[in-house]
Amino acid sequence: MTHETPQDLINALDSLLDREKHALLKGDVEQVGKLLHTKEQLIDQINILQTAEQLQLAAVQEKVTRNQALLNSALDGIRAVADRMADLRKVRGGLETYDQRGQKQKFGTQSFSSVEKRA
């Protein structure tokens, strides 16, 4: 990936961050992963720039911060789904309660799949 000017690098990162935002909003985690390598390369190249050129990065920095917040929200959602699925698996195994003495009681849940024949 060769860009001729520092502004080309900034423009490329700006465009990539817009694509990343759209992928995050659509929930397209696979696309976000595909963009990661290119984003890392662009950021590495931009980090080499002189201080005067880095001043042009303010708008891009806002997009990076925004996308990071979106990514964190997506990860929180994935964790919440995983926690909910774990809770549902636990419920299928039985119900746990506490009695008046504080002792744990477990009630098994069974699904009866019997067929009743009638004449």
Image (cartoon, rainbow, N blue to C red):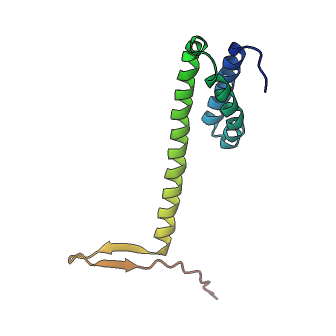
Quadrant where the C terminus lies? Answer: bottom right
Q: Residue at x 39, y 79 (%)?
A: 107
**103 left or right, relative to 30:** left
The front one of 17 and 112 is: 17
Residue 55 to residue 15: above or below: above
* Residue at the limit of the structure toward the left, as seen here: 101
- Counting from the top left corner in percent of width and height, residue 69 is at 51, 34
Task: Count every numbered label the image shows and give the total.
Answer: 0
**26 left or right, relative to 109:** right
Residue 83 to residue 5: above or below: below
**Where is residue 17, by image quadrant?**
top right
- Counting from the top left corner in percent of width and height, residue 100 is at 21, 76
Residue 79 to residue 58: above or below: below
The front one of 26 and 51 is: 51
Quadrant where the N terminus lies? Answer: top right
The front one of 67 and 36 is: 36
Q: Residue at x 20, y 78 (%)?
A: 101
- Counting from the top left corner in percent of width and height, residue 28 is at 67, 40
Q: Residue at x 68, y 25 (%)?
A: 45
**Where is residue 37, by image quadrant?**
top right
The front one of 50 and 30 is: 50
- Counting from the top left corner in percent of width and height, residue 23 is at 66, 34
